[in-house]
Image (cartoon, rainbow, N blue to C red):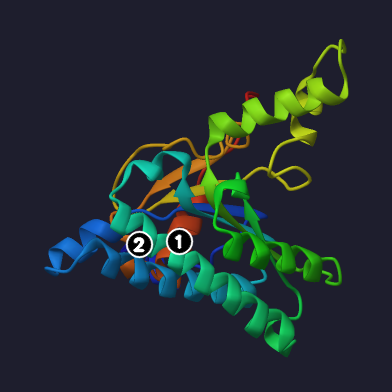
Amino acid sequence: MWFKKKNIETEKPVYPRHIAIIMDGNGRWAKKRGMPRSFGHKAGVAVAEKIIDYAIDIKLQHISLYAFSTENWQRPDEEISTLMTLFDTYAEKVINRYYAEKTERYKSLYIRFLGDTSVLSPSIREKIDTIEVLNRERTPSTIVNIAVNYGGRREIVKAVNDFIARNPGKHITEADIEKYLYFSGQPDPDLIIRTGGEMRLSNFMLWESAYSEYYSCPVYWPDFSPEDLDRAVIDFNKRTRRFGGV
């Protein structure tokens, strides 16, 4: 009997509640084209928007994008300046397109900037504050977390210190820490995708990823597509998650 080999393109992914993505490879993608790293970051923003649109289409409940880490400040000043300008422009776009226009497509979208945003420029912080105010009026079906100046270790230290400051002398539990995390109130990521072929956590969601499934994608972020996302989810669907059990 002949068996037809399954084609991954014909399989239908079953999407989990929360997908997180480490968007890696912008600089290498640009270098391969003889362009500066800033060219790759600009292309990466366009892909992030495309993936957010796709998350809306598939009714994904939560998607988290790792945009800028606490360690990324070590990069050249010119590259950091480009990234900050891109964040500022994108935050303004969120306000104008997703909220002020109140289009049918985006009326249930809810965007959050998570991380230590206190060190960002006044312009970016003001836009983030505006978005947070507008979020209060929304009933989200897709929550998008954009991690900016985010570090997993710093997040845990901040959560512990915040708890101690508010509860001096009290014994701390895991549940107490979770209340003070940036991602508090959201389910832990079921699947974490890293593009660019690397196999590192890079200090991303260290607490939340205790039982996440990981998927390394060889594609650089500017070339990442909805089809690549589906391939990762199909691979995830084939795994058995035991959470320490049998």
Q: Nearer the viewer, mark 1 or mark 2?
A: 1
- Which residue is rendered at x = 31% and y = 52% of the image? 77
Q: Earlier in the sequence, mark 1 or mark 2?
A: 1
- Which residue is rendered at x = 59% and y = 76% of the image? 92
Is residue 60 something that shows in the picture?
Answer: no
The residue closer to the viewer here, 227 or 111, is: 111
Q: Which residue is mark 2?
A: 221
Q: Hey, what amino acid is under mark 1?
A: Met
35 left or right of 146?
A: left
From this viewpoint, which residue is outermost toward the front? 122
Image coordinates of residue 18 in percent, x first then y, are: 63, 53
- Which residue is rendered at x = 80% and y = 16% of the image? 172
Q: Hey, what amino acid is under mark 2?
A: Trp
The residue closer to the viewer here, 188 or 39, is: 39
Is 231 situated above or below 138? Answer: above
Image coordinates of residue 46 in percent, x first then y, are: 42, 75
159 left or right of 205?
A: right
231 left or right of 138?
A: left
- Which residue is rendered at x = 76% and y = 35% of the image? 180
The residue closer to the viewer here, 197 or 101, is: 101
73 left or right of 246?
A: left
- Viewport quadrant of the C terminus: top right
- Viewport quadrant of the N terminus: bottom left
Q: Which mark is residue 84?
A: 1
Q: CA distance from mark 1 to mark 2?
A: 18 Å
Residue 45 image-quadrant placement: bottom left
